[in-house]
Amino acid sequence: MKHFIIDGNNLIGRTKILNQLLKKDKQQSRERLAFILSRYFSKRKATVSLHFDGFENEKINVPGIKIKYSQSLSADEKIKREIESVKNPGNIILITSDLNLLEFGRVCSCHILKSEEFAKLILSSESSDEEQNKIDEINSTDEFRRLFGIK
């Protein structure tokens, strides 16, 4: 099974909408990212750990995502430790654009996906889900009107 290790701060910084939110409210940007990731991974067979710098403020509970805070270390250091602790790092997909972490991941045989590329994936998936919900809503409204003879 694939294991995604995500550099949360880096991903927020590379995602325009989340980066704008970060400037106003760090906690809210982290929550928004966690919810986007939870939806994205809900239909995929993978484990996910999302790393943030610092200490936990308010607990973020989302299904399918393990959120890890670096405490007094850097998130990069915690990510490196997690990679080192995994038996088969070839199953890891590391999401970051941090050059130091990218190189460390490559040396450890991890698959690498830059934050910008992953942001496009999750956001396009997010908009596809929203579009599908709107289509379903329109179809159900049309069906309701048809069934009850409403024009």
Image: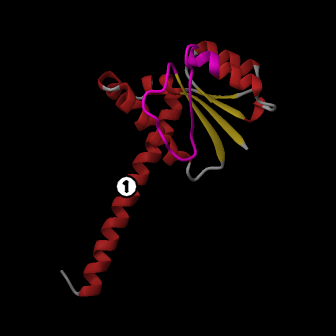
Kind of element beneath mark 1? helix
Residue, x 60% and y 17% (percent of image)? Answer: 76
Q: How many marks?
A: 1
Q: Is residue 40 left or right of residue 147?
A: right
Q: Residue furthest left?
A: 151
Location of the C terminus (image quadrant): bottom left
Relative depth, front residue between 149 and 25: 25
Q: Which residues are magenta?
A: 53-78
Residue 21 lies, with reference to residue 143, above or below; the image says above
Q: Is residue 109 above or below residue 119?
A: above
Left-right relation of 11 to 2: left
Q: Which residue is mark 1?
A: 131
Q: What coloring was used for the rendering?
A: secondary structure
Image quadrant where residue 89 sits: top right
- Write the residue at 45% across / 42% down: 35
Left or right side of 75 for 122: left
Picture layout, residue 81 above or below residue 93: above
Q: Percent x, y for residue 37?
A: 50, 41
Name the spot of residue 66 as percent of width and height, x first. 59, 37
Q: Main secondary structure of the magenta part?
A: loop
Indicate the position of residue 15 as horizontal and vertical percent values.
Answer: 42, 29
Q: Residue at x 57, y 14 (%)?
A: 74
Q: Is residue 77 magenta?
A: yes
- Label 1: few (<14), some or many (≥20) within 10 Å? few
Q: Quadrant of the N terminus?
A: top right
What is the x, y in percent for residue 54?
Answer: 50, 19
